[in-house]
C-alpha cells in the first residue's frame, strides 16, 4: 500500500509537470551588442531557473534601428511583455497610450527607497507617470588612451574643447591611419553634437538643453554658429573621413585599436573596454569645457516597461523586479557598464569608485563647471528630432548645407514643436 501511494504521488507530480502550461514572455532590447546581450541572457537564465515553467524570448534588433523596431511592434500590438525603453523614445511610446503605468508596482516594491535620488522623477518625465523602471543611468564622459597620447608627447588628457581639437589635430596622420577623435556620424549623434555646441554657452537652462536661461532657443544665438562650425572642424581635422558613418561599434573599435585615442561615451562602454583592453590602458575624464568654461552633460536612463496589452503583466513585473534587485543590478551594471540605480550597490562594490569612473566622479563633484541639464524629453516631437538633427548634420558634414542654414532649420523645428 505504501509503495502504491508513493507511485501515485510520483505519477501525479509527473502528470502535473507535463500538464503545466509553460509561459513565454517576449522581451525586446534596445541596445543589443556582443558584450551586453550575453549578460542579459545570463540574468534571464537565473530568472528562469528560479521560476520553472517561465521562458523569456529575447528579441535583439540592431542597435541603430532598435527604436524604430520597438515603436513599430508596440504601435501594432505585436506580442511583447517586456520592452526596453530609452529616455529618448519614452515620450513617443507613452504618447501611443500603450505603456502600463508602473506606479502600483513600484509603490509595492520593497527596494523603492533604495533608488538613487531623482531616478523616479526622471522616469516620470512624461505626464508625471513612471512608464518604465530604469535599470541604468548614463552620462557622457571623455575616454582617453594614456599609452597612445604619451607616444605622441601628451602627458595628460584635454581639459577644454580647444585642447581636444588641438590635440586631435596633432595626433592625426591620415597616411599612417592615426587620428585624434572618435567622431559619431550616425546612430543618434545628438548628445555628441550638443556636448560641443552647448559648451560655447554660459547660460543654458538647466531644465532644457535647447534654451538659454532667458528662454531663447540656443540655435538662434550667434554663439551657436561658432559652436557648430567648431564641431564640423573636429570632424574635418581630427577624425577619419568615414567616421561620418560611424555608430557606437565603429567608435569603440577605433578607440580600442588606438586609431582614435579620444572618445566621448557613456559608462556602458566600460564593460566592453574592460574585456578588450588591459587595466589602465584606458581612463576616463570629465568632458572638456568650452569657451564658456562650462560643459552641460545630461543624465540619460534606460529601463524596462510593460505594454498595456501584455497578457502577463504581473509576471513581467516579477522579472523587472528581479533585474532591479541590488545583487542583480550590481552584476548588470558592472558587466554592462551602466551607473547602478540603487544606492546600496555603490556601498558594497568599490568598483564604482575606482579609476574607471573617475570622469563621472569629477563631474559630479565640480558643479561650477558642470551643469547636468535635461533634454525636452516630454515633448512628443523628441523622437522626430533625433532623426531630423542627424539628417541635417550629415548634410552639413558633406558640404550640402551651410551651418547657418542648418541652425535655422533646427530653430524652426523647435518653434513648431512648441519648445518651452
Image: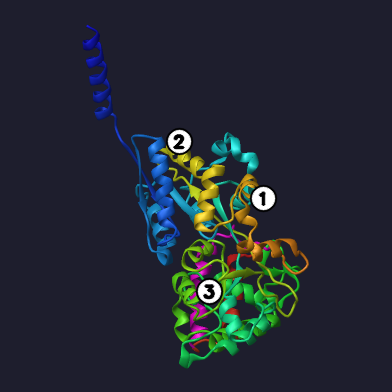
- Residue positioned most to the bottom: 175
The alpha-carbon separation of the residues under discs 1 and 3 comes to: 28 Å
Vertical placement of residue 417 versus 224, above or below: above
Q: Is residue 155 left or right of residue 99?
A: right
In the image, is residue 396 part of the stretch drawn in magenta? yes
Q: Which residue range is magenta in the image?
A: 372-398
Could you classify mark 1 by the number of other residues whose Cα lies within 10 Å: few (under 14), some (14-19), or many (20 or more)? few
Picture mark count: 3
For the residues labelled 2 and 1, the Cα–Cα distance comes to 25 Å
- Picture layout, residue 85 above or below residue 189: above
Circle 1 residue: 118
The part of the image, by quadrant, that contains residue 8 is top left
Give the CA distance from mark 3 to mark 2.
39 Å
Residue at disc 3, secondary structure: helix
- Circle 2 is placed at which residue position? 314
The one nearer the camera, 108 or 111, is 111
Tell me the quarter of the picture where residue 287 sits: bottom right
User: Which badge, 3 or 2, is on the more N-terminal residue?
Assistant: 2
Q: Give the residue drawn at x 56%, y 89%.
A: 237
Q: Is residue 284 above or below residue 314?
A: below
Q: Secondary structure at mark 1?
A: loop
Is label 2 in contact with label 1 (beta carbons under 8 Å)? no
Label located before the other in sequence (1 or 3): 1
In the displayed structure image, the side of residue 190 where residue 220 appears, left or right: right
The residue drawn where x is 55% and y is 57% is 338
Identify residue for label 3. Answer: 389
> Which x, y percent locates residue 185?
49, 77
Amino acid at each position: 500500500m505504501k509503495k502504491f501511494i508513493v507511485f501515485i504521488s510520483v505519477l501525479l507530480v509527473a502528470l502535473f509537470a507535463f500538464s503545466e502550461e509553460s509561459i513565454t514572455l517576449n522581451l525586446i532590447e534596445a541596445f543589443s551588442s556582443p558584450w551586453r546581450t550575453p549578460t542579459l541572457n545570463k540574468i534571464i537564465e537565473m530568472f528562469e531557473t528560479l521560476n520553472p515553467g517561465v521562458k523569456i524570448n529575447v528579441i535583439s534588433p540592431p542597435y541603430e534601428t532598435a527604436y524604430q523596431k520597438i515603436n513599430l511592434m508596440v504601435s501594432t500590438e505585436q506580442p511583447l511583455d517586456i520592452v526596453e525603453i530609452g529616455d529618448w523614445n519614452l515620450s513617443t511610446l507613452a504618447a501611443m497610450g500603450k505603456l502600463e503605468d508602473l506606479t502600483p508596482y513600484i509603490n509595492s516594491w520593497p527596494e523603492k527607497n533604495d533608488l538613487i535620488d531623482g531616478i523616479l522623477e526622471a522616469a516620470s518625465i512624461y505626464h508625471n507617470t513612471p512608464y518604465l523602471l530604469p535599470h541604468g543611468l548614463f552620462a557622457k564622459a571623455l575616454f582617453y588612451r594614456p599609452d597612445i597620447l604619451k607616444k605622441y608627447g601628451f602627458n595628460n588628457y584635454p581639459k577644454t574643447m580647444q585642447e581636444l581639437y588641438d590635440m586631435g589635430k596633432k595626433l592625426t596622420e591620415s597616411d599612417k591611419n592615426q587620428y585624434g577623435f572618435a567622431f559619431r556620424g550616425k546612430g543618434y549623434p545628438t548628445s555628441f553634437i550638443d556636448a560641443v555646441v552647448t559648451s560655447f554657452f554660459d547660460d543654458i537652462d538647466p531644465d532644457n538643453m535647447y534654451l538659454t536661461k532667458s528662454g531663447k532657443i540656443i540655435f538662434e544665438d550667434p554663439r551657436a554658429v561658432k559652436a557648430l562650425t567648431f564641431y564640423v572642424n573636429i570632424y574635418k581635422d581630427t577624425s577619419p573621413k568615414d567616421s561620418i558613418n560611424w555608430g557606437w561599434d565603429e567608435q569603440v573599435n577605433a578607440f580600442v585599436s588606438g586609431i582614435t585615442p579620444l572618445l566621448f561615451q557613456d559608462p556602458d562602454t566600460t564593460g566592453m573596454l574592460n574585456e578588450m583592453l588591459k587595466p589602465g590602458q584606458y581612463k576616463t575624464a570629465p568632458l572638456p569645457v568650452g569657451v564658456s568654461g562650462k560643459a552641460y552633460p545630461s543624465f540619460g536612463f534606460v529601463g524596462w516597461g510593460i505594454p498595456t496589452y501584455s497578457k502577463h503583466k504581473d509576471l513581467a513585473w516579477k522579472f523587472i523586479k528581479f533585474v532591479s534587485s541590488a545583487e542583480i543590478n550590481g552584476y548588470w551594471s558592472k558587466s554592462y557598464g551602466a551607473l547602478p540605480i540603487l544606492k546600496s550597490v555603490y556601498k558594497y562594490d568599490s568598483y564604482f569608485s575606482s579609476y574607471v569612473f573617475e570622469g563621472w566622479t569629477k563631474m559630479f563633484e565640480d558643479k561650477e563647471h558642470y551643469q547636468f541639464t535635461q533634454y525636452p524629453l516630454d515633448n512628443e516631437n523628441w523622437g522626430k528630432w533625433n532623426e531630423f538633427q542627424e539628417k541635417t548634420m550629415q548634410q552639413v558634414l558633406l558640404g550640402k548645407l551651410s551651418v547657418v542654414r542648418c541652425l535655422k532649420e533646427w530653430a524652426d523645428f523647435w518653434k513648431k514643436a512648441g519648445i518651452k
